[in-house]
């Protein structure tokens, strides 16, 4: 499997299983798809959906649901087995999305790493905004992409820039970042 970021704004998602796991999986998709249906049973017509999540308490029922979804060439995920995609531990912020996966082997470890990264970089969203601003400026002033990438990397490694962002002083951070140009 490989990671992808997908636009699901026109997709219909069905989560079968209304327990805690089904609720958590439904929350993952909420606001990111055209339609989200959370159901106790798989009585719905699976062909009406683009993504099917089997989140019942029964491994056998989840396997049956996934088998039906596979026969329809749908994207499917099982809470008790393997699907044709995994749901990573994720953070959705204004300027970035962070997703971590252990390929289904240790979901708690993926959640731990997600939380650690998110906690250790509280100003990361502001850094993304700063990088976007600098990148646009550099495209007009630095012709070589390799050199632009080196400058942007130097800004990411600049503790003074991070401290200014942590203090909510974007203008100071931008000024400090520009000294790397």
Image (tube, helix red, strand yellow):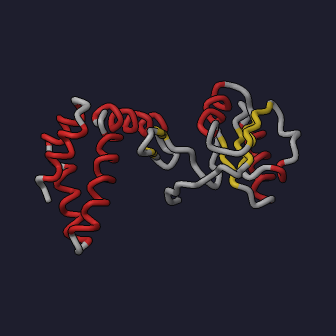
The structure residue drawn at horizontal position 45% and vertical position 45%, both measured from the top left corner, is 97
Q: In the rendered view, does 18 fall on the left or right side of 87? A: right
Residue pushed farthest top? 20
Residue 117 relative to residue 175: left or right: right
135 above or below 166?
A: below
96 or 165, nearer to the observer: 165
- The residue nearer to you, when weighing 9 against 85, is 9
Return the x and y of residue 109 as percentages of the image width and height. Answer: 41, 37
Up the image or down, 143 lies above or below 57; here it is below
Query: Residue 162 in the image: x percent, y percent?
Result: 20, 39
Whether residue 83 is situated above or below residue 15 in the rendered picture: below
Q: How many marks?
A: 0
Q: Quadrant of the C terminus?
A: bottom left
Of residues 95 and 43, the one drawn nearer to the viewer in this rendering: 95
Horizontally, is 165 left or right of 81 in the view? left
Q: Residue at x 29, y 44 (%)?
A: 127
Dividing the picture into quadrants, the one containing residue 28 is top right
Residue at the spot x=32%, y=31% of the render? Answer: 119
- Image point (48%, 39%), residue name: 92
Q: Nearer the viewer, residue 10 or 37?
A: 10
Q: Quadrant of residue 37?
A: top right
Residue 62: x, y in percent?
Answer: 74, 41
Report whether residue 155 is seen.
Answer: yes
Q: Most extreme residue toward the bottom, as rendered?
A: 144
Q: Could one spot residue 98 in this view of the protein?
A: no
Counting from the top left corner in percent of width and height, residue 178 is at 16, 53
């Amino acid at each position: 499997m490989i990671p992808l970021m997908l636009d699901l704004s026109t997709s219909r998602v069905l989560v079968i299983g209304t327990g805690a796991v089904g609720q958590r999986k439904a929350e993952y998709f909420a606001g990111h798809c055209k339609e989200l249906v959370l159901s106790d049973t798989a009585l719905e017509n699976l062909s009406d959906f683009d993504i099917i999540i089997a989140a019942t308490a029964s491994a056998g029922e989840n396997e049956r649901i996934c088998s039906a979804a596979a026969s329809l060439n749908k994207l499917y995920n099982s809470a008790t087995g393997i699907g044709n995609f995994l749901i990573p531990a994720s953070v959705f912020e204004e300027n970035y999305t962070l997703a971590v996966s252990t390929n289904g082997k240790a979901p708690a470890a993926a959640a731990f790493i997600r939380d650690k990264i998110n906690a250790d970089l509280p100003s990361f969203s502001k850094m993304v905004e700063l990088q976007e601003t600098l990148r646009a400026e550099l495209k007009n002033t630095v012709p070589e992409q390799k050199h632009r990438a080196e400058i942007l990397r130097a800004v990411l490694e600049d503790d003074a820039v991070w401290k200014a962002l942590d203090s909510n002083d974007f203008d100071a951070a931008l000024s400090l970042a520009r000294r790397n140009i």
